[in-house]
Amino acid sequence: MEHSLKTISPDGIPEANSKAELYRLLNEPEESESICYDVLAIQPDDQKALRILGLALTDQFDGSPSDRYQHAEAAFQQLSDSYERLYYLGLLHERRAKAQLRAGRAAHTLTVLLEQAMACYADAEKLRPVGNDDALLRWNRCVRLLQGRSDWHREPEPVETSDV
């Protein structure tokens, strides 16, 4: 017997997004992800579903090559608000770095990812709504991660000298 997916009603989208958010908070990102796909199947540009989907995917990062980094990035790239797009792309890089830290990946890789996150946060800071310091808070967390780990600092580039 073959099973097929059922389509939710457009009127059910707000409640479905609320449930997706709740499942994320309950640490059930797979459930949240599934609901987001149901919403996006009928409303492909639903900004809330795209945000929640990207976050649910990053919640599942474990630092392995099978992390669906590109899927999360694709969701965040579809956010129409420039500030949100930059902020959530910063979160993507930061969460990827943290997952790879937990998996024991090389320090220089983590530094690059955190620097990418910080670049996104710096750009988001320029576009942030009045009173929204989220990008600054995330920037500070990245700085503290870098400062707290001496093994994360990249070796300085060798300086060439000429014998004159």
Image (cartoon, rainbow, N blue to C red):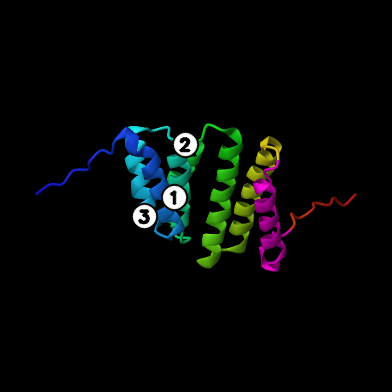
Q: Can you give x and y, in whole percent of width and height, for residue 54 in the image? A: 46, 46
Reading the image, the residue beneath label 3 is: 30
Q: Can you give x and y, in whole percent of width and height, for residue 80 in the image? A: 52, 31
Residue 47's disc number: 2
Magenta highlight on residue 137: yes
Q: Are marks 1 and 2 in contact (CB under 8 Å)?
A: no
Badge 3: how crowded within 10 Å, few (<14), some, or many (20+)? Answer: some
Q: Which is the main secondary structure of the residues drawn in magenta?
A: helix
Badge 1: how crowded within 10 Å, few (<14), some, or many (20+)? Answer: many
Question: Is 164 located above or below residue 61 in the figure?
Answer: above
The answer to which of marks 2 and 3 sits earlier in the sequence is: 3
Mark 3 falls on what kind of element?
A: helix
Q: Are marks 2 and 3 in contact (CB under 8 Å)?
A: no
Whether residue 67 is visible to the viewer of this picture, yes or no, is no
Mark 2 falls on what kind of element?
A: helix
Q: Can you give x and y, in whole percent of width and height, for residue 131 in the image? A: 70, 42
Q: CA distance from mark 2 to mark 3?
A: 19 Å
Q: Is residue 83 left or right of 16 when viewed as pictured?
A: right
Question: Is 46 located above or below residue 24 in the figure?
Answer: above
Mark 1 falls on what kind of element?
A: helix
Reading the image, the residue beneath label 1 is: 21
Q: Residue at x 25, y 38 (%)?
A: 7
Residue range in magenta is 131-155
Quarter of the rendering containing residue 105: bottom right
Question: Is 50 located above or below residue 59 in the figure?
Answer: above
The amino acid beneath tag 3 is Glu
Q: Residue at x 43, y 60 (%)?
A: 26
Question: Is 17 located above or below residue 44 in the figure?
Answer: below
Quarter of the rendering containing residue 66: bottom left
Question: Which of the two discs, 3 and 1, sits closer to the camera?
Answer: 1
